[in-house]
Image (cartoon, helix red, strand yellow):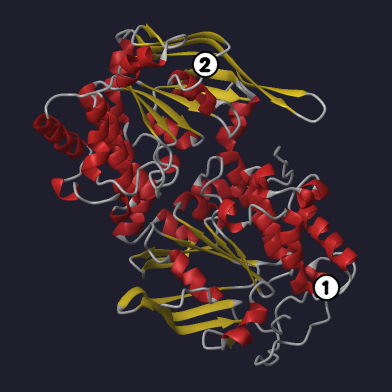
Amino acid sequence: MAVAGLRPRPRHGRLRPLAQQDQPMAPPDGLTVVAPSPQPLLRVEDLSVAYGRQTVVAGVGFALPRAGSLALIGESGSGKSTIARAVLRLLPRTGRATGRVAIDGREVLGLPERRFRPLRGRAIGFVPQDPGNALNPVRSIGVQAEEAAALLDEPDRVRRTALILETFAAVGLDDPRRVYDAYPHQLSGGMLQRVLIGLAILPRPALLVADEPTSALDVTVQKRILDLLSRLREERGIGLLLITHDLAIAAERADTLVVLKDGTVQEAGRTGTVFASPASAYARKLHADVPSLNPDRYATLREAGFRRRAAGAGPKIAVSAVTKTYRADGRVATQVTKAVDGVSFSVPAGTTHALVGESGSGKTTTIRLLLGLETPDAGSIRVAGQEVTGRSHEALRSVRRQLQLVYQNPFTSLDPTWSVEALVREPLDRFAVGTRLERAERVRAVLADVGLGPHLLARRPDALSGGQRQRVAIARALALKPDVIVLDEPTSALDVSVQADIVEVLLSLQAELGLTYVFVSHDLALVRQLAHTVSVMHRGCVVEEGAVADVFDHPRHAYTAALLDAVPRGIAGRARGPDRRLRTEAA
């Protein structure tokens, strides 16, 4: 069922433009008919949310017009997702919301659950952050889509399936039947996010709530998803409530911004005004922390690496013509995948070299070869003059002592049962470095290097913030005083403000200790801030390489240009408009 005054959904026939739908349906029990009016589609007034005695959102208010877009922005813990869940009535049982939430003029916050439930999915669609967790991994996409299609009240099963396939095609999935029959693990992250958007818009809601819908995606996939949401807004008149921590994305995609910190509104207004002249110190900090808006923020810290490179520092890492092929026996024939194909690059000591490209480009396989976790089929890898390939496990120990790794996700890379002290000390214990007292002193020293105090030694990872966890991971990598640190998407799971702090720590350590970094990322704006040289990878090959400024300012390959075009640019990016091609990525 739908709220009167909201866009009705078809019961039969093909999905039609909203303007062609003119037969409103009966409102759900407890809601009366409201005549169309210029009032906002969604109005939130004096909204507060508390868990027990702790208030996490206080006095928040905003309005979203039909077919409009509004972004809630702020760091983790600012209350963005809590507000969205209060609007959707999805707060946990311990949560209590007060204030007023009106949909098309009708207050719904105080409705009993049985009267609000018909609105959820029909009048209000929801796109969650992580498609990997939002979809059941042991059920096919089609089975889960049929559950969403039940909201259509279409009695004909064949017709419901046809509507699902039409919707999948409408959101840019090239082969809807294959997607329908597939399981989540058989689709890429971008395809799964499009599935979630398709399921959210299938019942034709008037309001779509998108909670960080692109935070885990490559920059090019991110652009396609955001383009899709913009197109749905334009063509179907859907109101979009976008939740993000990235001010550049919010400014590029939303008409109005609401900046949140610690559950309160810091400032709000038209995007152009808030973005160009932020009034609050917090909004100015968010602006300063976005890499694409401040490419030269760390130029002074990077200068030490530039000087070493200009002085002709010898290569700390030399990768030459490395190839890696994987073979999988299928039902008919052996499938051969060349994950890395003739990759070569070198990294001068004391500098940062970036490997960039989309998921599946070969970045992760390349660093696994560099770390000696995989053996290449051909080619050579040397670290500090020592050949990595062809060594026994014991022989690799001496190389690995000088070659450490910081993983992508600080929430899964640290053992949750260990204390901070034990996590940072473990490499020292394994290599039997110094006495017990010397190891304890070394732990405190490296924690201080990354800006953490001794009061955290006894804490476990679940008692730390995301930024603190990643600093612990960096301290652990520094414990053995390595020459080289491989950074595998070390900030992709963090807010831009926390990311900025981590980047500053890394560059400060490099300037002070002369560390050599290999930085793996799909975020070209961050690479421009951090790295000195770059290799652009596509389908296992290096398609372009050189100094970051040369490659990014004058890209020679079309793939590099496409990556750069996908970087959010805030207000400047609004002129680009959505990409109508909606290219489909391979699973």
Where residue 394 appears, as percent x and y from the top left, is 36, 15
Front in this rendered view, residue 553 or 155: 155
Observer able to see residue 500: yes
Cα–Cα span, label 1 and label 2: 57 Å
Q: Identify the element where label 1 is drawn.
A: loop
Where residue 272 appears, as percent x and y from the top left, is 48, 58
Which of pointers 1 and 2 lies earlier in the amino acid sequence?
1
**Above/below status of 561 relative to 5:** above
Q: Is residue 165 left or right of residue 407?
A: right
Q: Is residue 579 left or right of residue 160?
A: left
Q: Residue placed at 55% from the left, 74% from the top?
A: 88
Q: Nearer the viewer, mark 1 or mark 2?
A: 2
**Above/below status of 464 relative to 344:** below
Q: Is residue 73 left or right of residue 481?
A: right
Q: Amino acid at mark 2?
A: Thr
Which corner quadrant of the image does residue 1 belong to?
bottom right
Q: Residue placed at 65% from the left, 68% from the top?
A: 67
Q: Residue placed at 32% from the left, 61% from the top?
A: 280
Q: Residue placed at 76% from the left, 29% from the top?
A: 330
What is the tally of numbered marks visible in this picture?
A: 2
Q: Judge the density around disc 1: few (<14), some (14-19), many (≥20) Cα neighbours within 10 Å.
A: many
Q: Which residue is mark 2?
A: 375
Which corner quadrant of the image does residue 274 belong to?
bottom left
Q: Identify the element where label 2 is drawn.
A: loop
Q: Which residue is mark 1?
A: 10
